[in-house]
Image: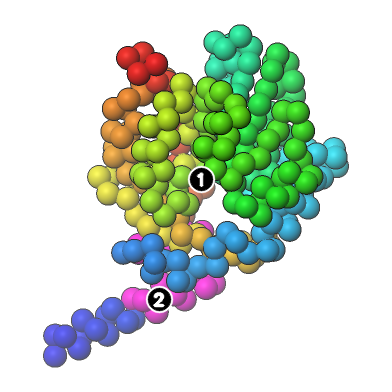
Amino acid sequence: MKFIKKLIQLVFSDYIISRITSISYGWHGNYSSWELAKSKCTGYDEEQILDRVLENALKVKNGEIPFERDSVPFDRKVYSFPVLSALMWIAVQNQNKLNIIDFGGSLGTSYYQNINFLETLTDVNWCVIEQPQFVSAGLKHFKDKNLHFFTALDDCQEKYEINAILLSSVIQYIEKPYDLLEDIISRNFEYIIIDRTLFLEKDEGRLTIQKVPKRIYNASYCCWFLSESKFLSVLLSKYQLIYDFEITERINIKSLYKGYLFKLKHKYI
């Protein structure tokens, strides 16, 4: 009898989760595995996503709109001044030059966001690492003397001497975020900038499904809320924290939405 009661509770709970995620946007659930969560998502490789991003990114490039992020057009440029401060500070310490990897940087959203300031620097190589279909679109429509596109970190580092890496709203969408983080740390980038990343004030993370509002496009992704203490312990083993900052956007799960600037400790340089 207890087994049947427990089974009914589990089935009912799963039904409620599925109903919520089918009618509402935002972050939902607490999934035990990436495979389970992924089976309930559409993912990033939907053609409609690239089409929508490309449409509005081209409008930014051509001066028709001031800014886009995640394919959403804005009527004004929205700056992340903590990130911009980090970019300019890094450049000042490198003879007014900036060679940066923008991991998961779409079609150059952050590059165009900050281009008015970047143009004051002596030299800029802004290298986006993305999925193959985004790289193809980037090479065709956006590549210029400053903006470059690659599918792998190794390919980028073979061509440019990178002094910083930016991860803006990306690491939480990776199946194994700490594997990526360890790989990045092993490359000894002098600076690591983290932006728009979701955290919990707990020792363990939480795996959710993020459903995009249908007014943007019909899609859903696996999304981690990382343990801030675990995340920091991994990075602080080799990097010093210069500053952190909070992102003021509403999230439907109680969490921290933050960014950080890290500098490689002297003994590793």
Residue at 29 percent of width and 37 percent of height: 229
Span of residues in magenta = 13-31
Q: Nearer the viewer, residue 93 or 210?
A: 93
| Quarter location, residue 4 | bottom left
Crowd class of label 2 (few under 14; some 14 to 19; many from 20; radius 10 Å): few
Disc number for residue 115? none
Q: Earlier in the sequence, mark 2 or mark 1?
A: 2
Q: Nearer the viewer, residue 83 or 50?
A: 50
64 left or right, relative to 116: right
Residue 167 appears in the picture as rendered: yes
| Quarter location, residue 268 | top left
Q: Magenta segment: does it hold 158?
A: no
Q: Secondary structure at mark 2?
A: helix
Q: Position of residue 17 (x, y in %)?
A: 41, 72
Vertical side of 243 occupied by 171: above or below = below
Tag 2 and tag 1, C-beta contact below 8 Å: no
Q: Position of residue 210 (x, y in %)?
A: 50, 59
Q: Nearer the viewer, residue 135 or 249?
A: 135
- What is the CA distance from the residue labelled 2 to the residue labelled 1? 28 Å
